[in-house]
């Protein structure tokens, strides 16, 4: 048996034979309505440049690890804040690139199919989340 955290902060026990399903709600403050990959089958707009995207995300991951190290080493507050700002800017750049790909591929494909309303709403909601953050 394996312990697993649930959305409400409690733990549950699962057997080893239980299929693994990632619970993104822990990281997203409430989760997503369903499994994203089932709702939106690929390929996605970023698929053609996936390796470059993964490389950028790995660099950002390294920045975050560097931030942890800075805090662990009691680095001056302003220096830590400067690095947080840099990591946030890097994530924003990735988000804007993904949004551009979504508009150029997913929304355009939906428009060609004659039903762009849902994709436009989805993109508008994503823009609102980016602007708010």
Image: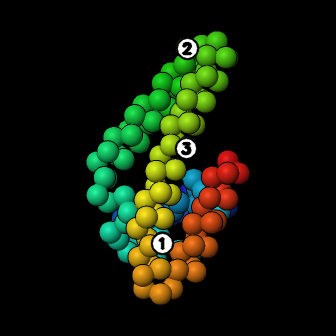
Q: Select label 2 or label 1 by which is in front.
A: 1
Marks 3 and 1 sit apart, C-alpha to C-alpha, by: 21 Å
Drawn side of residue 2 relative to residue 129, left or right: left
User: What residue sits 42% from the left and 31% below the top?
Assistant: 62
The residue carrying pointer 3 sits among few (fewer than 14), some (14 to 19) or many (20 or more) residues within 10 Å by Cα, namely some
Q: Is residue 67 above or below residue 41?
A: above
The residue carrying pointer 1 sits among few (fewer than 14), some (14 to 19) or many (20 or more) residues within 10 Å by Cα, namely many
Residue 33 is tagged as none
Element at badge 2? Answer: loop
User: What residue sits 40% from the left and 67% below the top?
Assistant: 105
Image location of residue 47, percent across then percent down: 32, 60
Residue 107 is tagged as 1
Image location of residue 68, percent across then percent down: 53, 26
Element at badge 1? Answer: helix
**Can you see residue 94?**
yes
Q: Are marks 2 and 3 in contact (CB under 8 Å)?
A: no
Q: Along the polypeptide, which appears first: circle 2 or circle 3?
A: 2
Question: What residue is shown with label 3?
Answer: 92
Marks 2 and 1 sit apart, C-alpha to C-alpha, by: 46 Å
Q: Along the polypeptide, which appears first: circle 3 or circle 1?
A: 3
Question: What residue is shown with label 2?
Answer: 73
Element at badge 3? Answer: helix
Image location of residue 102, percent across then percent down: 46, 63
User: What residue sits 42% from the left and 81% below the top?
Assistant: 112
**Depth check, front residue: 22 or 117:** 117
Q: Select label 2 or label 3 by which is in front.
A: 3
């Amino acid at each position: 048996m394996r312990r697993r955290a649930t959305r409400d902060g409690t733990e549950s026990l699962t057997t080893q034979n239980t299929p693994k399903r990632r619970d993104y709600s822990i990281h997203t403050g409430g989760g997503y309505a369903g499994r994203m990959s089932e709702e939106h089958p690929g390929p996605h707009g970023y698929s053609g440049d996936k390796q470059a995207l993964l490389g950028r995300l790995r660099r950002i991951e390294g920045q975050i690890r560097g931030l942890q190290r800075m805090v662990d080493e009691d680095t001056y507050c302003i220096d830590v804040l400067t690095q947080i700002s840099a990591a946030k800017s890097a994530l924003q750049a990735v988000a804007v690139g993904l949004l551009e790909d979504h508009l150029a591929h997913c929304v355009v494909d939906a428009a060609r199919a004659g039903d762009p309303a849902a994709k436009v709403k989805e993109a508008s909601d994503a823009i609102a989340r980016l602007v708010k953050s």
